[in-house]
Image (cartoon, helix red, strand yellow):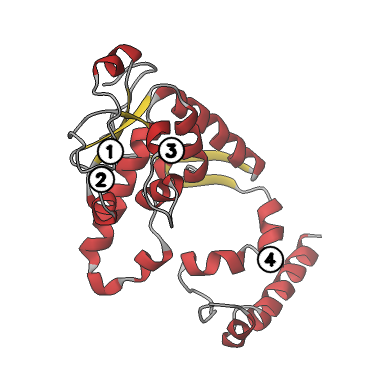
């Protein structure tokens, strides 16, 4: 049976190498890149996940997942939704996030603030305004409601600060240091949400469930212990 299964898999692989991972395939796709074995994962993922070979492997038991970077395994879309639902989470920035350039470059934090702290903070302060006072906490939901870009939502902006886009991954002309700076800044943004205890508990339960559903029996999580873990209801 094992030999027959291996023969079937080999046949599917050979067929997909011919029919999918081929330069002619791009002519059937809008805005497609030249498909070939060994292409960049970010460009290949959508096509890869549509193949029969992937669908079969996805259902197979995997055994162990080794050297898995924990904060890179979280569904960012889901994490931002949870942060927006969490009572007391605020955004505060080192400077006004008054234009698109500052919103992409400026340092900001997401932290819990108690009702007492918020009662002392200046009212009706917008982090998007030029009159914003640095490090003033603004409720995350309020920042979402008042987000100023018409061609972008608050959530999409948060995703852009937490992930490396396909365009950024291909901007090799900026040099190695540029992509590493973006890479490191993504983990800072993710960590400020992920390592707040209520979100961390939800994220770990969800992640472990996803791994189990994927047939993984053991996972070796990796993380650099430079993050700040905050208990529920604590700012620091």
Is there a contact, CB below 8 Å, between mark 1 and mark 2? Answer: yes
Label 1 neighbour load within 10 Å: few <14, some 14-19, many 20+: many
Q: Give the Cα distance between marks 4 and 2.
A: 46 Å
Q: Earlier in the sequence, mark 4 or mark 3?
A: 4
**Which mark lies nearer to you, 4 or 3?**
3
Q: Give the Cα distance between marks 4 and 3.
A: 44 Å
Report helix, strand or loop for mark 1.
loop
Q: Which residue is mark 4?
A: 53
Viewer-proximal residue among 191 and 221: 191
Check the image and name the residue furthest to the top.
116
> Does 178 sit left or right of 24 as displayed?
left
Q: Which residue is mark 1?
A: 127
Check the image and name the residue furthest to the bottom.
24
Specify the quadrant that holds the C terminus: top left
Q: Earlier in the sequence, mark 4 or mark 2?
A: 4
Residue 116, compared with residue 78, is above or below; it is above
> Does 29 sit left or right of 38 as displayed?
right
Q: Which residue is mark 2?
A: 97
Label 2 neighbour load within 10 Å: few <14, some 14-19, many 20+: many
Report helix, strand or loop for mark 4.
helix
Q: Which residue is mark 3?
A: 145
Q: Earlier in the sequence, mark 4 or mark 1?
A: 4
Q: Give the Cα distance between marks 1 and 2.
A: 6 Å
């Amino acid at each position: 049976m094992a030999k027959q299964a291996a023969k079937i898999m080999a046949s599917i692989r050979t067929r997909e190498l011919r029919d999918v991972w081929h330069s002619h395939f791009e002519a059937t796709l809008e805005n497609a890149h030249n498909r070939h074995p060994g292409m960049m994962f970010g460009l290949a993922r959508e096509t890869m996940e549509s193949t029969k070979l992937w669908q079969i492997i996805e259902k197979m038991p995997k055994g162990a997942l080794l050297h898995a970077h924990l904060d890179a395994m979280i569904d960012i879309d889901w994490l931002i939704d949870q942060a927006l639902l969490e009572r007391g989470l605020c955004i505060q920035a080192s400077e006004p996030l008054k234009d698109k350039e500052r919103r992409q470059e400026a340092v900001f934090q997401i932290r819990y603030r108690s009702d007492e702290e918020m009662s002392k903070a200046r009212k009706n302060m917008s982090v998007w305004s030029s009159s914003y006072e640095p490090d003033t906490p603004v409720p995350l939901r309020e920042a979402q409601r008042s987000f100023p870009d018409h061609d972008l939502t608050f959530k999409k902006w948060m995703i852009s600060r937490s992930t490396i886009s396909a365009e950024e991954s291909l901007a090799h002309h900026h040099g190695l240091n540029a992509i590493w700076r973006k890479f490191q800044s993504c983990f800072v943004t993710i960590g400020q949400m992920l390592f707040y205890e209520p979100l961390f508990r939800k994220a770990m339960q969800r992640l472990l469930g996803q791994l189990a559903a994927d047939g993984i029996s053991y996972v070796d999580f990796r993380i650099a212990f430079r993050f700040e873990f905050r208990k529920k209801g604590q700012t620091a």
